[in-house]
């Protein structure tokens, strides 16, 4: 593959090509470039005494990985063909981190610096890594290498951490700055982050709650994030979950993000609200629900729940409802919690009855008649 590696600022801007299987001359030129940069003491994580033979071994292994699409070498050339820059990406060796790649060994020969080669190399690596299924590209830069840090910032990398004083050059110690750039994720990805869900999850002894999540017996209740917009639409846009909803099925997927943002704002302002309900086993979104005032100036809280059809019939809504009533009692003591249910919605009526909510009669709303159930939850 041969790509023009970014905008040419001037005539001498190098071209960048991605190499998955390189000819000997190219590999020799890359090795020469790296060994020379290391011997100048540049911040590449290599010994200044690294030999050509040692770097040749590295390139052999890199090319073997490149054949499997687990790595690639980018090479910047002058219009005349001379190699003046290089960079590489490699896939994490951990089988569970196949989506993590590392950008490394970025170097431009001193005579070609400032001509856009660094940027073109990084963009070529990013494009190739993305095509190979890399979702996050990370790198480690030496804390004193502010030119390189500026280059990476400029190319969409953001600092995600710092290892203080771990690079040892003689008696000097320098930081390592960890940087990362998000690439593309498949649409059905569940971004669980730090949530205690999925393989390998555990809880500290005696703990069932974190700053943005809470465990019940079988559910993980999480503060809303806009990452779950697809799941929100999948559940609210499913006619099966809206049989009793006079407003009908959600039709516009773009509405999911503003709704979730309004839920987030309510949590920020009031300290309670509607949760995203996940299965602790795999983190999959099962539904949504909780308590909050239906309108800002209402003096009662609305109990709300909606689950995927696959999660029906297991008592999850009742389990969520108990947690919601407990939260209401703590966060808004004395406020009545109300559920307005359509007359033929038997499963939902059974849920509120199990929660001990009293039938208070029928109420007329804009979209029809509802059965009103109410409780003032005890703390
Ligand atoms: C870091 C290095 C690869 C940059 O290569 P380069 O070809 O000069 O970079 P570019 O010309 O593409 O620069 C692209 C952008 O990066 C930023 N940048 C690069 N070097 C910079 C510097 N010294 N100071 C501030 N910004 C810098 C600028 O934003 C620049 O864009 P601009 O000139 O339009 O403002 C090169 O200096 C090098 O080989 N250094 C030694 C090896 C090294 O430190 N590698 C990084 C290891 S982590």
Image (spheres, rainbow, N blue to C red):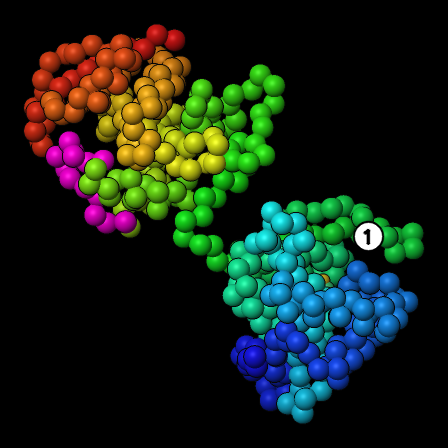
- At x 71%, y 58%, the residue is 141
Q: Quadrant of residue 158?
A: bottom right
10 Å crowding of disc 1: few (<14), some (14-19), many (20+): some
Which SS does the magenta portion mostly show? loop
Is 182 drawn above or below residue 124 in the view shown?
Answer: above
Magenta residues (range)? 241-253
Residue 111 on image: x %, y %: 75, 82
Residue extending farthest to the bottom is 80
Beta carbon at label 1 within 8 Å of ligand 1: no
- At x 63%, y 62%, the residue is 70
Residue 13 on image: x %, y %: 62, 83
Q: Quadrant of residue 106?
A: bottom right
Front residue (pair 59, 223): 59
- Residue 306 visible at all: yes
Please indicate whether residue 127 sits to the left or right of residue 175 in the image: left
Residue extending farthest to the top is 378
Residue 1 on image: x %, y %: 56, 79
Q: Dot 1 lies on which element?
A: strand
Is 378 drawn above or below residue 273 in the view shown?
Answer: above
Please indicate whether residue 370 sits to the left or right of residue 221 in the image: left
- Residue 151 visible at all: no
Q: Quadrant of ligand 1?
A: bottom right
Q: Which residue bears the numbered disc 1?
A: 167
- At x 43%, y 31%, the residue is 279
Is 276 drawn above or below residue 120 in the view shown?
Answer: above
Is 176 drawn above or below residue 108 in the view shown?
Answer: above
249 in the magenta segment: yes
Q: Quadrant of residue 275?
A: top left
Please indicate whether residue 173 sits to the left or right of residue 364 in the image: right
- At x 81%, y 69%, the residue is 57
- Quarter of the figure with the C terminus: top left
Front residue (pair 109, 17): 17
């Amino acid at each position: 593959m041969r790509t023009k590696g970014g905008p040419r600022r001037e005539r001498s801007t190098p071209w960048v090509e991605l190499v998955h299987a390189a000819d000997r001359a190219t590999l020799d030129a890359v090795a020469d470039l790296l060994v020379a940069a290391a011997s100048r003491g540049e911040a590449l994580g290599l010994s200044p005494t690294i030999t050509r033979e040692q770097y040749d071994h590295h390139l052999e292994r890199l090319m073997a990985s490149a054949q499997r699409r687990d790595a690639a070498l980018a090479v910047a050339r002058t219009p005349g063909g001379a190699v003046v820059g290089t960079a590489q990406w490699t896939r994490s060796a951990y089988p569970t981190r196949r989506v993590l790649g590392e950008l490394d060994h970025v170097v431009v020969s001193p005579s070609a610096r400032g001509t856009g080669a660094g940027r073109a190399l990084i963009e070529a690596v990013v494009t190739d890594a993305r095509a190979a299924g890399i979702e996050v590209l990370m790198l480690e830069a030496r804390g004193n290498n502010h030119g390189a840090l500026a280059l990476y910032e400029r190319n969409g990398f953001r600092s995600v951490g710092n290892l203080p004083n771990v690079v040892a050059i003689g008696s000097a110690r320098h930081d390592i700055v960890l940087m990362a750039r998000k690439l593309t994720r498949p649409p059905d990805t569940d971004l669980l982050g730090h949530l205690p869900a999925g393989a390998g999850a555990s809880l500290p002894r005696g703990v069932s709650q974190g700053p943005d999540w809470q465990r019940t017996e079988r559910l993980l209740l999480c503060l809303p994030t806009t990452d779950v917009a697809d799941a929100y639409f999948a559940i609210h846009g499913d006619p099966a979950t809206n049989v009793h909803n006079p407003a009908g099925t959600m039709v516009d997927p773009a509405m999911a993000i503003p709704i979730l943002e309004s839920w987030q704002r309510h949590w920020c302002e009031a300290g309670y609200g509607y949760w995203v309900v996940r299965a602790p086993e795999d983190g999959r979104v099962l539904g949504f629900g909780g308590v909050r005032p239906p309108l800002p100036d209402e003096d009662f809280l609305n109990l709300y729940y909606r689950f995927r059809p696959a999660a029906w019939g297991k008592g999850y809504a009742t389990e969520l409802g108990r947690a919601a009533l407990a939260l209401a009692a703590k966060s808004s003591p004395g406020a009545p919690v109300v559920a307005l249910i359509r007359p033929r919605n038997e499963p939902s009526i059974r849920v509120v009855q199990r929660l001990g909510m009293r039938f208070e009669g029928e109420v007329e709303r804009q979209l029809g008649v509802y059965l009103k159930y109410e409780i003032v939850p005890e703390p």
